[in-house]
Amino acid sequence: MHKNSLVLLCCLSLAACAGSSDKSDGGSSWWSFGGEEKPVAVKKAPPKIDHQLTDAWLDEYEPRLKSALSGSKMELERRENVLVVTAPVDSSFNPDRPSMLMPAVLGPFTKVAKILEKDPRTGVLILGHADSRGQLDSNFKLSEDRAKAVASIFRLSGLQRDRLLLKGVGPDMPRAANDSAAGRALNRRVEIVLTPKPTLVALLAKYSQPAAAPALPVAQVAADQKKKEKAQ
């Protein structure tokens, strides 16, 4: 559903309406790095992405991350302007304690975190996803708790709060239909979006742009004007 697109980042606009807490373990909100938690109305054009810088970063880190994840059940995918590490919930979290990571995934996550923490250029966005079963509020909370569990590894590895964001988006961004067990398993996941920090800032700003007000048809404008004149 989200192949060859930035669906992960599109979900941020949906996440603003999710009703779950916006605070991460590091105190960052999804629209800022380490800043005060408040929605910002973006009135100017978003910053442009430096594609040369971004492509160079992706070329450098893709093979390193692929090596770090070798032998694990996590996936690494290169999309436009970002690398995405996907951790399936069913093999990454304890079934009896749904927000607790399994010991087997601590190694791969730590390797990824160690690769990134020494490079101040890197921005990290961690997104928790759920399937559509159960109560909506519970799904959002669980997806956020799982994102926090992964973020804690990055924090322990030394990644500073001004480079790390997280959000639980519940079932809002499925990558498969929820009408089968296999589809629901694909939807239960944590995704780590990686890219240079300036690129992530530009992408977040892009998806925070307010929608333009639709132009009213000429006939409707004329009718509204007549109503005003009669009222006067």
Image: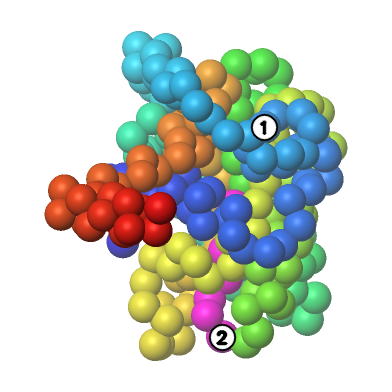
Give the image location of residue 13, x and y in percent.
Answer: 50, 50
Please determine whether, in this image, residue 107 is positioned above or below residue 170: above
Binning the other alpha carbons within 10 Å of mark 1 as few (below 14), some (14 to 19) or many (20 upward) gives: some
Picture residue at 53% right of the left edge, 30% below the top: 42
Horizontal and vertical percent for residue 192? 57, 45
Camera-side residue: 153 or 65? 153
Specify the segment rendered in magenta: 127-133
Quadrant assignment, res 45: top left
Q: Is residue 62 visible?
A: no
Residue at 76% across / 57% down in the picture? Answer: 21
Circle 1 residue: 32
Element assignment for label 1:
loop
For mark 2, what is the residue?
A: 133
Which amino acid type is shown beneath numbered disc 2?
A: Arg
Residue closer to the observer: 182 or 70: 182
Foreground of the two, 135 or 222: 222
Quadrant assignment for the N terminus: bottom left
**199 shown above or below 130:** above
